[in-house]
C-alpha cells in the first residue's frame, strides 16, 4: 500500500517539525514528503531515524520558500495519484490533495494560517503601504486554496482545543483534538541552580521583551534566554549590560534538556499560543511554569499546581510578583505534580492516538 506523510518544509527545530519526524518514525511504512529541508534543521534530522524526501527541483528552486512549497505540493506530488492513506499537515502541503485520486485523506492541523485569518490585520500593517494591496490579494487567493483543500479531507485532527475553536470560528469546520507529542521521557530534574529560563523564539508575539524588562528590575534574580530569532539584537539592547540576563542562542537538544533540568522555573508568555511544547517540556523535568492565561497554556498548565498563569496581556509588575511567589513555592511537591501533568502529553499518548485513527 502507498501511504504518505506530508508537511510543508523542515525549516528549524520547531514543534511542527518535531511532530512530523515523530510520525515518520512511528509509521515507517509512510513515505515522508516535504518541499525542502533547510540547514538550520539539519541537527534535528541527523538525530532522527526518519527518512525525509524532498519534492523540490527544476526552476521552482529559485522561488521564495512559501511559493516553492505551494508549487511543489500542487504540481510535483503526482506520486499521490494512487495513494491508500495520506496524512497532510502544515499550510501548503494540503494543496497536494488534488493529486490524490483515491484512498483516505487526513489532515493534522497545528494551526490555521494565522497570517490569513486572526492575525491578518496586524500582519498587513507590517508591510509598506505600497505592498499592502498585493498582500491583500494574495491572502484572498490563498484562503480559497487552503479552505478548498482541507474541505476535501475525510477527517481533521487539531493539536488543541484552542486550535479547534479557531478552525470552527474562521473556516466553519470541526475537528478532533489529538495533543502533539512531547518528548517527556528525555527531560529530567537535575538540580535547582536558581535561574529562570525563557525558551520562546525571539519574535514579537512571544513577549520575551516583557520577561527581559521584568528581570532588569530584579537584579538579584537570573534569567537565561535560551533561543534566537529576529528580535535578538533588540532584546540584547534592552538588557544592556545587566549581569543577571544571559542570551545563549539556540541550543542542541542535549544542551536544552540540561538547561531545563537545572532551572528553577520556565517563563513562557506567548500571544494565544496554539499549544506550546515548552511548558510541557518544563513540567516533564519537574519545573513549574509561569505562563499566560490564554491559548494552549490553558490546556497544559494547572494554576497553583504546576505553575502560575498571568492575566493577558501580562505586565512587567505581574511577572515580578509571579517570580517572587514562585520563589516560595518551588519544592519536591510542586515538581512531582509537574511531572505527573506532563505525562498526559507524551509521545506515547500521541502515537497511540494516531495509530488508532490511521490504522
Image (cartoon, rainbow, N blue to C red):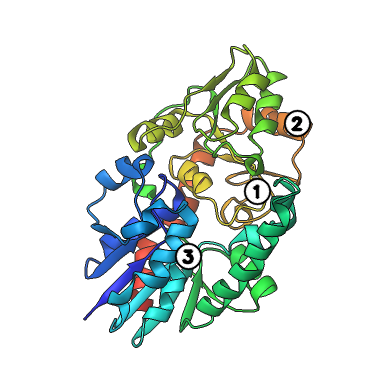
Q: Which of 193 and 77 is in front in this view?
A: 77
Q: How many numbered discs, if any?
A: 3
Label located before the other in sequence (3 or 2)? 3
Q: In this view, does 355 lie to the left or right of 293?
A: left
The residue lying at 74 percent from left, 31 percent from top is 321
Q: Is residue 338 left or right of residue 74?
A: right
Q: Which of 66 and 319 is in front in this view?
A: 66
Residue under label 3: 92
Tag 2–tag 1 contact (CB < 8 Å): no
Q: Is residue 200 left or right of residue 344?
A: right
- Residue found at the very far front of the displayed protein: 59
Measure how far apart labels 1 and 3 are at the Cα level. Answer: 36 Å
- Tell me, for residue 329, which label it has, or none: none
Quadrant (top left/top right/bottom left/bottom right) for the N terminus: bottom left
Question: Is residue 56 in view from this perspective?
Answer: no
Disc 3 is placed on an element classified as loop
What is the x, y in percent for residue 275? Answer: 55, 56
Label located before the other in sequence (1 or 3)? 3
- Tell me, for residue 316, which label it has, or none: 2
Disc 2 is placed on an element classified as helix
What is the x, y in percent for residue 189? Answer: 41, 35
Q: How crowded is mark 2: few (under 14 residues within 10 Å), some or many (20 or more)?
A: some
Question: Is residue 244 in view from this perspective?
Answer: yes
Residue under label 1: 303
- Residue found at the very far bottom of the displayed protein: 102
Amino acid at each position: 500500500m502507498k501511504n504518505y506523510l506530508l508537511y510543508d518544509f523542515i525549516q528549524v527545530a520547531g514543534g511542527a517539525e518535531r511532530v512530523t519526524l515523530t510520525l515518520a518514525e512511528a509509521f515507517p511504512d509512510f513515505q515522508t514528503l516535504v518541499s525542502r529541508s533547510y540547514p538550520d534543521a539539519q541537527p534535528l534530522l541527523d538525530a532522527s531515524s526518519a527518512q525525509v524526501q524532498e519534492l523540490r527541483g527544476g526552476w521552482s528552486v529559485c522561488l521564495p520558500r512559501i511559493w516553492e512549497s505551494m508549487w511543489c505540493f500542487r504540481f510535483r506530488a503526482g506520486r499521490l495519484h494512487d495513494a491508500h492513506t495520506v496524512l497532510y499537515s502544515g499550510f501548503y502541503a494540503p494543496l497536494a490533495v488534488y493529486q490524490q485520486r483515491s484512498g483516505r485523506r487526513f489532515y493534522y492541523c497545528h494551526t490555521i494560517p494565522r497570517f490569513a485569518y486572526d492575525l491578518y490585520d496586524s500582519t498587513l500593517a507590517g508591510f509598506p503601504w505600497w505592498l499592502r494591496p498585493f498582500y491583500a490579494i494574495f491572502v484572498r487567493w490563498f484562503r480559497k486554496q487552503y479552505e478548498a483543500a482541507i474541505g476535501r479531507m475525510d477527517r481533521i485532527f487539531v493539536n488543541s482545543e484552542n486550535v479547534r475553536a479557531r478552525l470552527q470560528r474562521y473556516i466553519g469546520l470541526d475537528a478532533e483534538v489529538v495533543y502533539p507529542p512531547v518528548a517527556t521521557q528525555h527531560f529530567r530534574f537535575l538540580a535547582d541552580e536558581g535561574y529562570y529560563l525563557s525558551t520562546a523564539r525571539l519574535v514579537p508575539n512571544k513577549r520575551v521583551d516583557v520577561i527581559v524588562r521584568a528581570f532588569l528590575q530584579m537584579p538579584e534574580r537570573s534569567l537565561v534566554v535560551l533561543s534566537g530569532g529576529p528580535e535578538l539584537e533588540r532584546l540584547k539592547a534592552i538588557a544592556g549590560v545587566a549581569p543577571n540576563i544571559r542570551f545563549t542562542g539556540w541550543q542542541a537538544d542535549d544542551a536544552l534538556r540540561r538547561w531545563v533540568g537545572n532551572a528553577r522555573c520556565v517563563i513562557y508568555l506567548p500571544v494565544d499560543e496554539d499549544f506550546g511544547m515548552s511548558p510541557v517540556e518544563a513540567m516533564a523535568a519537574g519545573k513549574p511554569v509561569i505562563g499566560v492565561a490564554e491559548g494552549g497554556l490553558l490546556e497544559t498548565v494547572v494554576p497553583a499546581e504546576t505553575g502560575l498563569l498571568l492575566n493577558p496581556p501580562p505586565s512587567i509588575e505581574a511577572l515580578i510578583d509571579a517570580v517572587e511567589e514562585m520563589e516560595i513555592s518551588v519544592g519536591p511537591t510542586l515538581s512531582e505534580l509537574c511531572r505527573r501533568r506532563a505525562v498526559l502529553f507524551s509521545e506515547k499518548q500521541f502515537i497511540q492516538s494516531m495509530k488508532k485513527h490511521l490504522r
